[in-house]
Amino acid sequence: MTQAQKASLSPETVLAEMKKNRVTHVVWLPDSETNWLYLLMKAEPSLTLVGVNREGLAFSAAAGISAGGKHPLVLIQNTGLLESGDSLRGWALGLDIPVVMMVGYRGWTRHGVNTDTAATYTERFLNAFGINYYLVESDEDAPRISIAFEEARKTKRPVAVLVADEYHGFNR
Amino acid sequence: MMDTAEMLKVFNRYRGDAIVVPGRGGRHWVAISTRPSRDLPLGDPAMGGHASFAMGLALARPDQKIVLFDSEGDVQMGMGILATIAEQQPANFYHFMLDNECYGTTGGQPVPGARTVAYDAIARACGYTRTHAYDNLETFSLNVERILSGPGPVFVALKVRPEIENEPIGTRRKWRTRTQVQAIRDLRRELGIAEA
């Protein structure tokens, strides 16, 4: 196994975290690099996939699922998060919805200069809404996903997981 | 066009034990409903999200009939959800839409395509199982029982008279008797759902 492979986040790990945290519905819009995770989720009988075509709709859908006693996960890219502000405010924060949003952190880099404005504004956006977030770069960070779920349950608020390694986290 | 309150009174005769998300009809529904613990009068958490919220509720509770009173302004803002609802095919979802051809809470400006958009045709093209459109109370009254007794997802476009509000928001009549969070808590208790 190469160093790069060791340091990556696998879609199997992401799926295992969903199951561990009793996710019933994944409300999602494909990230740039989510295809393998999509195939895994589709094959998982305990999950219902609810595809939306604009990310703001994901938060209101997740609020309805949560109001009905089930456990949604929102799976989107940071670009979509940026367009979701009012829905996130009104439907998730306003209704005390304990939901984890797993956000592909497009453009993020640990090294050098970030050249993608989607990444530039992601954490600023979350901070503006007072939403806590956890950065996940590799399988070693996977426990942070469970921490996010636990925090969402305790605080009855949305909590974000920023998937820094979109390609490996959502693909193979 | 029909009067929203009168239409809701007719609907209430056939409501049964459905969970009702009254949406833009909430101001009237709180005075009409006899089963408030099965109502979710949320007001307007964020425009454009009522249908996706109610769809989520329907998916989470397939054992319950979910009725939504959406609006045409909300549908236009989140129209993509019609495709998602059609894809998910929640048989327990009854999607009514109040169409007053304007943004009533901002002074009555017309919505885009106020007189031309056929919302029932859009829902049908997306894949809703059944779609209907009514512009008078009499025809609606004759059909509402049949609509509610068949399977969803069903979409019902209703032409209603505008009720224009043009006062500063802070001076408008507060019609909600419970907070949004309390309404959800009450419904969860009614359904026997333990707090997360």
Image (tube, coloured by chain):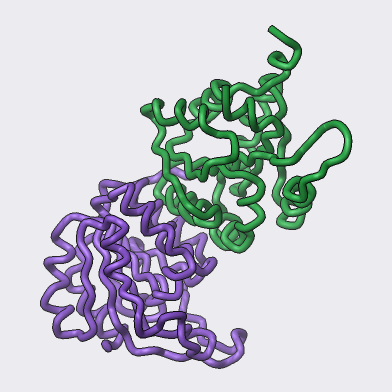
Chain colours: A green, B purple
Q: Position of residue A26 (x, y in %)?
A: 47, 40
Q: Nearer the viewer, residue B156 or B180?
A: B156
State whether residue A120 is above or below residue B99: above
Q: Position of residue B76 (x, y in %)?
A: 44, 70
In the rendered image of this protein, does residue A19 appear above or below residue B55? Answer: above
In front: A36, or A123? A36
Whether residue A153 is visible: no
Seen in the picture, residue B31 relative to B64 is either above or below; the reply is: below
Above or below, comparing residue A133 to residue B40 in the picture = above
Query: In x, y percent, where is residue A156?
Result: 59, 48
The image quarter containing residue A43 is top left
Q: Residue at x 32, y 71 (%)?
A: B119
Q: Position of residue B165 (x, y in %)?
A: 50, 90
- In the displayed structure image, the side of residue B62 where residue A52 appears, left or right: right
Residue A145 seen by the camera: yes
Q: Residue at x 26, y 70 (%)?
A: B156
Say which quarter of the image contains residue B1.
bottom left
Q: Who's the residue at 23% across and 75% down the image?
A: B133
Q: Which sits in the foreground, B13 or B80?
A: B80
- The answer to whether residue A115 is left or right of residue A48 is right
